[in-house]
Amino acid sequence: MEKKNIDWSSLGFGYIKTDKRFVANFKNGAWEEGVLTEDSNVVISECAGVLQYAQTCFEGLKAYTTEDGKIVCFRPDLNASRMADSCKRLQMPVFPEDKFVEAVVETVKANAAYVPPFGSGATLYIRPYMFGSNPVIGVKPADEYQFRIFCTPVGPYFKGGAKPITIRVCDYDRAAPHGTGHIKAGLNYAMSLYQIVDAHEQGYAENMYLDAATRTKVEETGGANFIFITKDGTFVTPKSDSILPSITRRSLMIVAEKYLGMKVEHREVYFDEVKDFAEAGLCGTAAVISPVGKIVDHGKEILIPSGMEEMGPWTKKLYDTLTGIQMGKIEAPEGWIKEIM
């Protein structure tokens, strides 16, 4: 298979149209088989449920070329499960989890020429999503839905390495208690846009959201979970019913304990504790880990001891181990790697 003529080393994190995408429709109470199509356009009614009441959810994962030349995906079964949870919460029909994984495999195979080569630092980003497609004018769930997957080659999230970022404590709430913070709904991300644009204008890379009920506990950013390392090398990550269950974070917890021998704590993290951590970071599909060097709380600076120059030592080990597993350099736990071709 001949790769596309793309300068892989110069890719950014953006959209490039590829050859094929997967489409399946839900009508009359059942899902169609679904097909691969070259048509990248979505044609829906002006009154479609997604346009009127934001009935949509999505996922994000990647395909990699491993050291031995195979094309693989990382834990797509967890993306399927998380999307099922999102659909249930939004009164949308669940796309069968086994069919989800099959559709991911089909889509990647059909676009194998766009999967960047090993060592390029680039990957194929995969975006499954679903939305209400039929006209809905009363406030109610749609009757028809479309499930789609497209993919696009992307460069490393941080060119030249991940430098620690500065974030701020946000005055807005990301998610309400008993709300939709635990699912990957499009509406959650729309609600964070005002805050992230303002943060960037103020010179910050991201927002730190505190819990809406008490504003004393760390939750997450607009699109990533927090991880912290204590001075004695304990891996700590916030626990809350309104935090999205990041697949990267859940994987890092296992890497920390099973591969690096770290003590792992998944618990409520109070903001007052942050000043005492030795390392901090954000974790997610796009960047894997973004190290945090400084947190600003309304003018008061909290400097993370690992500094603003490079990842802390434990964070670097976590990053190298997880990416090593994804790229086939390190043996993966059973079931983590889905071989595509």
Image (spheres, rainbow, N blue to C red):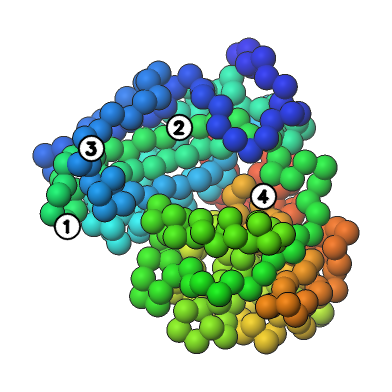
Q: Name the residue beneath numbered marker 4.
A: 287
Which class describes the residues within 10 Å of circle 2: few (<14), some (14-19), or many (20+)?
A: many
How far is the residue under mark 4 from the one under mark 3?
A: 36 Å
- Residue 275 in percent (x, y) is at 76, 82
Of residues 213 and 70, the one nearer the viewer is 213
Q: Name the residue beneath numbered marker 3.
A: 46
Q: Quadrant of residue 182?
A: bottom left
Helix, strand or loop at label 4? It is: loop
How far is the residue under mark 3 from the one under mark 2?
A: 23 Å
Mark 2 is on which residue type?
Answer: Phe
Mark 4 is on which residue type?
Answer: Ala
Q: Name the residue beneath numbered marker 1.
A: 139
Helix, strand or loop at label 1? It is: loop
Horizontal side, residue 119 vs residue 287: left or right = right
Q: Residue at x 36, y 71 (%)?
A: 179
Horizontal side, residue 294 vs residue 24: left or right = right
Mark 1 is on which residue type?
Answer: Val
Q: Residue at x 75, y 80 (%)?
A: 300
- Tell me, for residue 70, which label it has, or none: none
Q: Name the residue beneath numbered marker 2.
A: 150
- Residue 277 in percent (x, y) is at 76, 78
Q: Residue at x 31, y 52 (%)?
A: 54
Labels 3 and 1: the sequence-earlier one? 3
Instruction: Report the mark closest to the observer, 3 or 1.
Output: 3
Q: Quadrant of residue 206?
A: bottom right
Mark 3 is on which residue type?
Answer: Glu
Instruction: Report the mark closest to the observer, 4 or 1.
Output: 1
